[in-house]
Amino acid sequence: TQALAIKNLKKVYDDGYVALKGVDLDVAKGDFFALLGPNGAGKSTTIGVISSLVRKSEGSVSVFGNDIEHDLVRAKRSLGVVPQEFNFNQFEKVEDILVSQAGYYGLSARQAKPRIEHYLKKLGLWDKRFTQSRMLSGGMKRRLMIARALIHEPELLILDEPTAGVDIELRRSLWEFIKEINDQGTTIILTTHYLEEAEQLCRNIAIIDQGEIVENTSMKQLLSLL
Ligand code: ADP
Ligand code: ADP
């Protein structure tokens, strides 16, 4: 089975705008995959549908063979998503945010503690564990979102423009961190509008434009065409 299988996905927003016009996409288990496209192409919409935040109009999506409609609980368990916008409780402390998240997946605080410590240390947030999320810098919030998406150790991690608006140094360290997660066997999909970011990281790539996949190939193949 594929890590992600999208078939004929269409999305028409309530105002009539057609954001996805029949997207087909397969991502193999273990892959490091980029969905590249300009602003407005439909990247966030695609991720919204995969993570059940956006209602699809037509088509199907499955995560490790579990359809997001019929096997939602199983699909969600194998999926971690890092959205673009920060959506924390501003007054909750960093550690508590992660404990709550772990709770959604049935982990007790005691079971969650070692994982939380691991990810907070890895992501340079350990010193901030008792800090309210509103006090974090933009880059720290981004790292907290990544930790939160990993807390139930999903097999597929999807990141929506993970390095948008972060400085070059943090960008490089996030790249290293995500690569490491992939090396440990987690399938990674990221969206980006920088070819360079895809080039640095990804094995396979799809290019989306105006709600349609216009290219779907290996990074190597794409670079040889440019
Ligand atoms: P990307 O992530 O590639 O920048 P999006 O998926 O965010 O693209 O948006 C695709 C298109 O859908 C854009 O033209 C955007 O304006 C439109 N869109 C996004 N959300 C909505 C919405 N809630 N209602 C209507 N149109 C939307
Ligand atoms: P980073 O420094 O992680 O790239 P930003 O560019 O968002 O993140 O932050 C720039 C600077 O502003 C950082 O030094 C950060 O500490 C500070 N900062 C950002 N948001 C806040 C906040 N809410 N409270 C205090 N300092 C903040």
Image: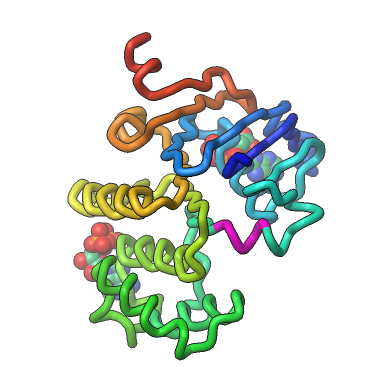
Q: Is residue 18 left or right of residue 87?
A: right
Q: Quadrant of the N terminus?
A: top right
Q: Residue at x 38, y 78 (%)?
A: 116
Q: Quadrant of the C terminus?
A: top left
- In the image, residue 81 sits, relative to residue 11, either above or below, namely below
Q: Residue at x 69, y 55 (%)?
A: 52
Q: Position of residue 211 (x, y in %)?
A: 64, 28
Displayed-image quarter of ligand 2? bottom left
- In the image, residue 10 sits, relative to residue 214, either above or below, namely below
Q: Residue at x 46, y 40 (%)?
A: 191
Q: Position of residue 102 (x, y in %)?
A: 52, 77
The colour mode here is rainbow
Q: Is residue 33 magenta?
A: no
Q: Position of residue 121 (x, y in %)?
A: 26, 73
Q: Magenta part mainly helix, strand or loop?
A: helix
- In the image, residue 19 sits, relative to residue 30, either above or below, namely above
Q: Residue at x 23, y 81 (%)?
A: 127
- In the image, residue 76 sits, relative to residue 27, either above or below, namely below
Question: In the current view of this chain or complex, which residue is farthest to the bottom?
Answer: 110
Foreground of the two, 50 or 203:
203
Q: Is residue 60 left or right of residue 189?
A: right
Figure quadrant of residue 104: bottom right
The part of the chain drawn in magenta is 75-79
Question: In the current view of this chain or complex, which residue is farthest to the front?
Answer: 1
